[in-house]
Amino acid sequence: MAYASFATGVLLAAGLGTRFDPQGLHNKLLARLPDGTPVAHEAAHRLLLVVPRVVAVVRPGTDALARVLNDAGCDVVFSAAVERGMGASLAAGIDASADADGWVVALADMPRIAISTIEHVARAIDDGASIAAPFYGEQRGHPVGFGPEHLAELQALDGDAGARALFAMHPVTRIDVDDPGVVQDVDTPDDLRRIGSD
């Protein structure tokens, strides 16, 4: 049985994925893992095993992706602001869950994060950490946790820097994990094949 967190998940699923398909015909988040599961569905499923609610942020016009995320159990938020970058996407997810007791923020193109890693991050936030992040070696990965005291700062994010500024301004609880999934995303078809063979 997975750890049951009080935090809310935010799944960022609004990227264009141009490195995966420069023509823009195939959304990488709908690409299928070897067992047939779409990348975004697997990322959402793992998050939902730990947190009670996941808000998935998508761009307008991605109805097929929204259906996949709905089927996984997410509350889907369409946001035109995502055109401005990851910071704006994260702010949209936080706005849609402003009453949360903290957040665990994950990326929809990272389907191989161990459930135990998500549990460690969520538990740190539930236990009062300001910000928590997993590290694989010296690489900081995802998901990242934020305590409820960061609501206003997260809502104010914009552009493509994400939450980088918060990491510079606040203490971060480092969680060392033996989980390469925290730094493995699906940016290219080769990435998908590599992740699929792990």
Image (cartoon, rainbow, N blue to C red):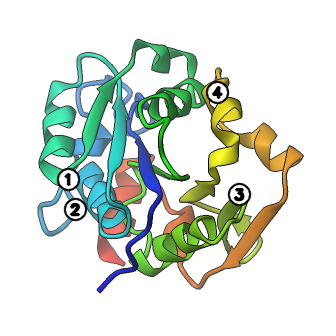
Q: What's the distance in space between the residues labelled 2 and 1, CA to CA?
A: 6 Å
Residue drawn at x 75%, y 68% is 173
Q: Of all residues shown, which one is farthest toward the right?
A: 169
Q: Is residue 145 left or right of residue 161?
A: left
Q: Is residue 186 visible?
A: no
For label 2, the crowd category at 10 Å Cα-Cα, with few meaning under 14, some 14 to 19 and many 20 or more, is some
Which quadrant of the view contains residue 133?
bottom right
State which mark lies toward you, 4 or 2.
Answer: 4
Q: What's the distance in space between the residues labelled 4 and 3, CA to CA?
A: 20 Å
State which mark lies toward you, 3 or 2.
Answer: 3
Q: What's the distance in space between the residues labelled 1 and 4, CA to CA?
A: 25 Å
Which quadrant of the view contains residue 150?
top right
Give the answer, above or below, for where 110 lies relative to 196.
above
Q: Is residue 66 left or right of residue 123?
A: left
Tag 2, which secondary structure?
A: loop
Tag 4, which secondary structure?
A: loop
Q: Amino acid at mark 2?
A: Leu
Give the answer, above or below, for where 151 lies relative to 54.
above
Mark 4, residue position: 160
Mark 2, residue position: 33
Expressed as whole percent of the image width and height from the top left, the position of residue 106 reads 47, 52
Tag 1, which secondary structure?
A: loop
Task: Evaluate if marks 3 and 2 touch, with contact meaning CB atoms under 8 Å apart.
Answer: no
Sequence order check, earlier mark of 1 and 4:
1
Mark 3, residue position: 131
Expressed as whole percent of the image width and height from the top left, the position of residue 92 reads 48, 26
Q: Amino acid at mark 1?
A: Pro
Mark 1, residue position: 38
Residue drawn at x 53%, y 79% is 179
